[in-house]
Image (spheres, helix red, strand yellow):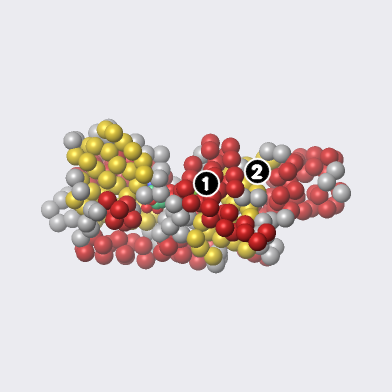
């Protein structure tokens, strides 16, 4: 493309709410045939709420929220924010966690009131060998069937309850995906969340391919695999998790309100909240570069 065409493309993109890091991004976007979309924070608002909670026999909800809320006070994950907000709403405040550690893609842990508290998904509990009662497992399965995310809480290796969190799909998501599909693009939902939750969201939005349970470290590899055989992949993401995947894609697009790492790793930054900015970004390059060349 000529320098003039690229300048026009860059100017037009700003009007549409798209920031382009360099002219290569416009060239890359023309060739895209697959669009990979992160779930949490990209297709969904990323603002989660606790919609349900269940405690194990001898425990109570105050204790569950105190332990889980305290651990999540150290977390930057949207699930953590939801749990902390609920704990504060019911208890006023929670003690600060000691020795907090995030377990990316799994959960988080810390010492609270001298107790080792683990908060996270079934996979984390499986790996730690922390048993989950059949009763709590039932609650977990029900939550998953509804497309929600179930978070287990353990105190000193004993599971004390389940918190069910959920977020909302962005209203613009179905229209954005419909447009991408009309443009002949393949759409894929990529998430660390479990298959059932991912499928529910994908069905709501109209995406037919799902890659679920992908650990943060494996998101970039999932992109590489899609790129095999010359497929040109655009990745849209917002999270710390998405940085390497955004960098691996032929075209990385970061949600502007996402993490610094996502924004830094991307070729384009999507400033407009409406997700129809995604097909706009892909069409923009096509139009500018073919008209003016
Ligand atoms: P996504 O790809 O949807 O952004 P992540 O890779 O960040 O998801 O997380 C995957 C899963 O790990 C979550 O769905 C949740 O079950 C669990 N998880 C991660 N961080 C936390 C946390 N701070 N508290 C509870 N669960 C967590
Ligand atoms: Mg995300």
Q: Is the residue at mark 1 in contact range of ligand 2, meaning its CB lies under 8 Å from it?
A: yes
Instruction: Pick whichever, 130 or 52, lies toward us.
Output: 130
For the point 73% across and 43% down, the residue is 24
Disc 2 designates what residue? 268
In this picture, is 213 found above or below 100? below
**Label 2, residues with CA under 10 Å away: few <14, some 14-19, many ≥20:** many
For the point 46% across and 48% down, the residue is 216
> Residue 238 location in percent, x, y?
53, 45
> Residue 176 location in percent, x, y?
61, 58
Q: Secondary structure at mark 2?
A: strand
Instruction: Pick whichever, 191 or 214, lies toward us.
Output: 214
For the point 59% across and 48% down, the residue is 248
Residue 242's disc number: 1
Q: Is residue 249 visible?
A: yes
**Label 1, residues with CA under 10 Å away: few <14, some 14-19, many ≥20:** many
> Residue 40 location in percent, x, y?
47, 51
Q: Is residue 94 visible?
A: no
């Amino acid at each position: 493309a000529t320098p003039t065409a690229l300048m026009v493309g860059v100017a037009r993109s700003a009007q549409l709410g798209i920031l382009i890091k360099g002219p290569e991004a416009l060239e890359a976007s023309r060739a895209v045939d697959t669009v990979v979309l992160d779930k949490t924070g990209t297709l969904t608002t990323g603002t989660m709420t606790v919609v349900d909670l269940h405690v194990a026999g001898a425990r109570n909800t105050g204790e569950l929220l105190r332990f889980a809320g305290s651990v999540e006070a150290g977390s930057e994950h949207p699930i953590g924010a939801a749990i902390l907000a609920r704990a504060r709403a019911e208890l006023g405040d929670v003690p600060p966690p000691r020795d907090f550690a995030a377990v990316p893609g799994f959960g988080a842990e810390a010492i609270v009131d001298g107790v080792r508290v683990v908060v996270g998904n079934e996979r984390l509990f499986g790996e730690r060998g922390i048993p989950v009662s059949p009763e709590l497992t039932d609650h977990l399965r029900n939550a998953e069937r509804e497309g929600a995310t179930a978070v287990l809480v353990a105190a000193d290796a004993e599971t004390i309850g389940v918190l069910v969190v959920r977020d909302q799909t962005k209203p613009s998501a179905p229209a954005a995906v419909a447009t991408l599909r009309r443009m002949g693009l393949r759409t894929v939902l990529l998430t660390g969340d479990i298959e059932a939750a991912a499928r529910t969201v994908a069905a709501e939005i109209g995406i037919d391919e799902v890659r679920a349970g992908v650990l943060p470290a494996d998101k970039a590899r999932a992109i590489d695999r899609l790129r095999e055989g010359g497929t040109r992949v655009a990745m849209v993401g917002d999270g710390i998790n998405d940085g390497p995947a955004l960098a691996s894609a032929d075209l990385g697009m970061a949600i502007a309100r996402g993490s610094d790492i996502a924004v830094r790793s991307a070729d384009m930054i999507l400033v407009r909240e409406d997700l129809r900015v995604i097909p706009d970004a892909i069409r923009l390059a096509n139009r500018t570069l073919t008209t003016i060349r």
